[in-house]
Amino acid sequence: MPEPAVEPMWLARSPDAWADAPAWMSFSDLRNIEACPRRWSLSSASFSDIWSGRGYPPKIYLATLSGHILHGALELIVKSLNRAGCPSVASESFVNVMRGLGGYTSIIEQAVAHVLNKLNENPRFTPRSRYVVAELKKAAPALRENLQILTGKLRLEGAYCGVGAQQRGRSALNEGTYAEIELRVANMHWHGFVDILTVSESNCEIVDFKTGEPAPEHEEQVRVYSLLWARDRELNPQGRTANCLTLSYSRGDITVKSLTDHELELLESDLMLRSSRVLAEIRKTPPPAVPSVDNCTFCPVRQLCDEYWTDATQELLAQEKSNASGSELRHLADFEVEIGNQESPSIWRAVTLGGQALQRSSRVMLRIPEEYTTARRIVKRGGRIRIIDASLADQIEDDATSPLISLNRFSEAFVL
């Protein structure tokens, strides 16, 4: 019986076609392209034989999922409160709305279900679906607590709009509070989704909810949103400026200084110049890679990036890590190996062809537990594979001379 073919998902190869420039630039796209054009392009290119989604299927990170869950839950609450004309989270109508939604626990459960439903479209989710579901279940109490804290900070104006404004042809916004509202500036070809936009007779506030720790780019992002609001002639034909910019974290809020008209003009010029530069970079074939510890450690497409696996890049990354932490070794590491003989049901001999944690041509033992069926299907003698996020031990009991590379629940293996 012939061996089954390797699923396209687990082949380390170039895309069907490199990504076109984004029709609408966003803050996240700009920063991602500036950081590494190759990473952005691989994450946005066409892999039609793998799935119908945009780019290469993203790697699953629990912290990212938690952020999506909280944002989705907040959006549901704000839109429900606005539909009910709720003027404040301290009002009686707030209690009625939350009761109708089933309370915070039910809202989190709905948001988790929505995120998991989307994940089912991602082929990288299937091998670790049980682990992810179990971890999100354990995280539910903490997510509920964060949601309750963030909801308590909402300032409402009691007028419902939200998605409705876009469905009506992006007409001018009335006074009210809007969740996940898209701002677009046609002459800049820029857009952005604001978590909360509140418009009143005397004030205009932009609130961006953050689930991580404060970072300088968060302030830059909310300032960009203030520019998009000021320049969006469909939703804001009068060109009102935001006089209150807020970054809302579970541990507290940070007020960002609002921009003057002159500062908005400077920001617009800067964004247009930066956009022009990054667009030129991603039109190259292939787009340039910018290896660094910050760019590569959690890069979701590094298994596809030949530049990442060169000796020069691996030496650079090892040196950066050594300078930063005093140790070249990580808890998790990446390896390119050639498979040798199988020594037991779960152990293979191998030789390293790349990776920063061990020298090239190091003889190692590779452990792939029985439950990791996807990885076991692609391992065969003489084959070359790239493994990301593997564990490394100094030795194995049966062979004290060879380091042990072990696949774990974070690991993935790809055929070359």
Image (spheres, rainbow, N blue to C red):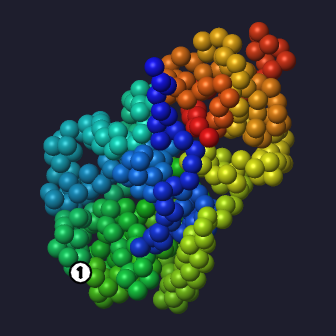
- Confirm whether residue 217 shows in the render: no
Residue at position x 41%, y 56% in the image: 54
Above/below status of 85 relative to 303: below
Residue at position x 61%, y 15% in the image: 346
Q: Residue under circle 1?
A: 172
Above/below status of 293 relative to 265: above
Quadrant, the N terminus: top left
Q: In this view, does 268 lie to the left or right of 296?
A: left
The picture places residue 379, in percent across and down from the top left corner, at 59, 27
The picture places residue 246, in percent across and down from the top left corner, at 45, 65
The picture places residue 63, in percent across and down from the top left corner, at 50, 43
- The furthest residue to the front: 1
Q: What crowding class fits label 1: few (fewer than 14 Cα within 10 Å), some (14-19), or many (20 or more)?
A: some
The picture places residue 250, in percent across and down from the top left corner, at 46, 49
Q: Which amino acid does label 1 sit on?
A: Ala
Quadrant, the C terminus: top right
